[in-house]
Image (cartoon, rainbow, N blue to C red):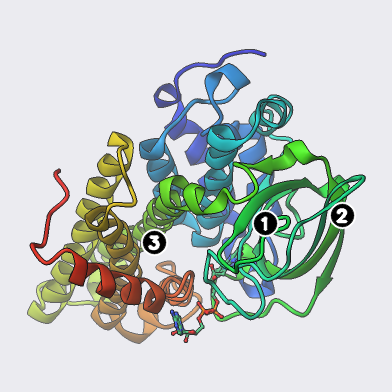
Amino acid sequence: MTAVAAPSLDLSARVARVAAVALEHARRTDDEAVFQVEALAELRASGLLGLLVPVAHGGLGGGPADLIDCAESLARADLSVALIFAMHCQQVAVLARYGGEELRDTLLPRIAAGERYLASVTTAPGSGGHLLSAAAPLRETGDGLLIERFAPIVTGGAHADGFLLTMGSPGGSAPGQVCLVYADRAQLLITESGQWQPMGMRASHSVALRLTGTVPGHQLIGGPHGFREISLALFSPLAHLGWAACWLGAAAGALSRVAALVRSPAGRQRIDHRSELLLTRLARARHRIDAVHALLRHAQHTVERGGDLSAAPVQMLLNGLKVTAAESCRQAVEELIDAVGLRHGYFKDSATYLERVLRDLRSAALNYHNDRLDLADGRLVLLDRSVTHVAG
Ligand SMILES: Cc1cc2nc3c(=O)[nH]c(=O)nc-3n(C[C@H](O)[C@H](O)[C@H](O)COP(=O)(O)OP(=O)(O)OC[C@H]3O[C@@H](n4cnc5c(N)ncnc54)[C@H](O)[C@@H]3O)c2cc1C
């Protein structure tokens, strides 16, 4: 196994290559609602699929800050590609921390080499997005662990080389007993169903799959009832950091393109750059973006510090990040559409592509529904009557 250089040395060049490819194919893949295979190929070639793989296993050994930097940069080009990347990294981090030695030793070097792109299977029919309920149980048979699972929405599911799936714990009787299991594509019979024709995030190609197969016992991650702890300590915190970074990048990219348009000679002919209404709207968009950035970095430092991430103030911070980023990034783009008007705000062929970014960002509140997090946080607010702040 070869150790590679520290990620900070060359991350930006790797990300810039992927972002350029993502941008080149973004319009077509959005029109056709197809996966960005070109960007995935570049992610594989760039080594970025191994961003969170430890150096000892051949990866780049990055952490949450690197994930945020990369996801934000990719989202400036295309939000679907950024989400594909962030969700893959979340699966890798879980595998690296909670996978058993045999699984880590076989899988992590292959991820680092760009041979394994991982998808996430948590949503289940009936329970929607609720993470700690999984209708289909994992069954122990004489041959191993039997997976029979319908997954209504799997980002990149038709292209993933492996899957981390939540299932009911083997032998578990209570609905909250959930486990996490890894399955390689080669170990599964996979049937795709339905059509992928959403409003936005069209290049994420998040399809419905039926997955059936048997995997050896060592592919269970974190024990038979292990997902609750994994979710609180790593899976959900990284999801919220990664998603927020993606949405922030999409909004920041939109503002950057609008500022460039307004200052360009062509833009100056159409848009009055001294208009107080325009300047106020630009300022508001910027304030929303800066607020999400500050919250994201505060949450990142909290996660990096470790400790008990299940404590009520930390949970509220992480949930609040997700909800605030989902709302504020979309609102910032709405502000920009009002600022530049029909031609550059609403038409598909504008170089600002605000129309696509707005459609993409509309999914943010639904991707683990904000309502669920608000409800959970409302309960926590009542437990934390003194309103404890998480130290910066
Ligand atoms: C672009 C995109 C990509 C995705 N990729 C994946 C993926 O790769 N893998 C995966 O597993 N999932 C994925 N998801 C699914 C996502 O994470 C959510 O789990 C899913 O969107 C929830 O679906 P839902 O809105 O139907 O369900 P729910 O969250 O159940 O929401 C349905 C309705 O129930 C209401 N509701 C919410 N909470 C409660 C509550 N506590 N009590 C009562 N009612 C409530 C909501 O207001 C909402 O109206 C993706 C989603 C998106 C948008």
> Which numbered tag is attached to residue 213?
2
Q: Are marks 3 and 2 in contact (CB under 8 Å)?
A: no
Q: Which of the two residues, 102 or 238, is positioned nearer the viewer here?
A: 102
> Which numbered tag is attached to residue 247?
3
Of badges 3 and 1, the one in the foreground is 1
Q: Which of the two residues, 29 or 153, is positioned nearer the viewer here?
A: 153
Farthest residue, direction bottom: 342
Disc nearer the start of the sequence (3/1): 1
Q: Are marks 3 and 1 in contact (CB under 8 Å)?
A: no
Spatial separation of the CA atoms under disc 3 and disc 2: 35 Å
Identify the residue at horizontal 87%, vertical 54% (top origin): 213
Q: Is residue 371 left or right of residue 33?
A: left
Is 234 placed above or below 357 here? above
Name which residue type carries label 3. Trp
Identify the residue at horizontal 72%, vertical 26% (top origin): 102
Q: Are marks 2 and 1 in contact (CB under 8 Å)?
A: no
Q: Is residue 178 left or right of residue 210?
A: left
Disc nearer the start of the sequence (3/2): 2
Could you tell me residue 360's position as x and y percent?
A: 48, 72
Name which residue type carries label 2. Gly
Image label count? 3
> Which numbered tag is attached to residue 169?
1
Could you tell me residue 322's position as x and y percent?
A: 35, 63
Name which residue type carries label 1. Ser
For label 1, count other residues whose C-alpha is less than 10 Å away and answer few (under 14), some (14-19) or many (20+).
many
Of badges 3 and 2, the one in the foreground is 2
Disc nearer the start of the sequence (2/1): 1
Q: Which of the two residues, 45 or 300, is positioned nearer the viewer here?
A: 300
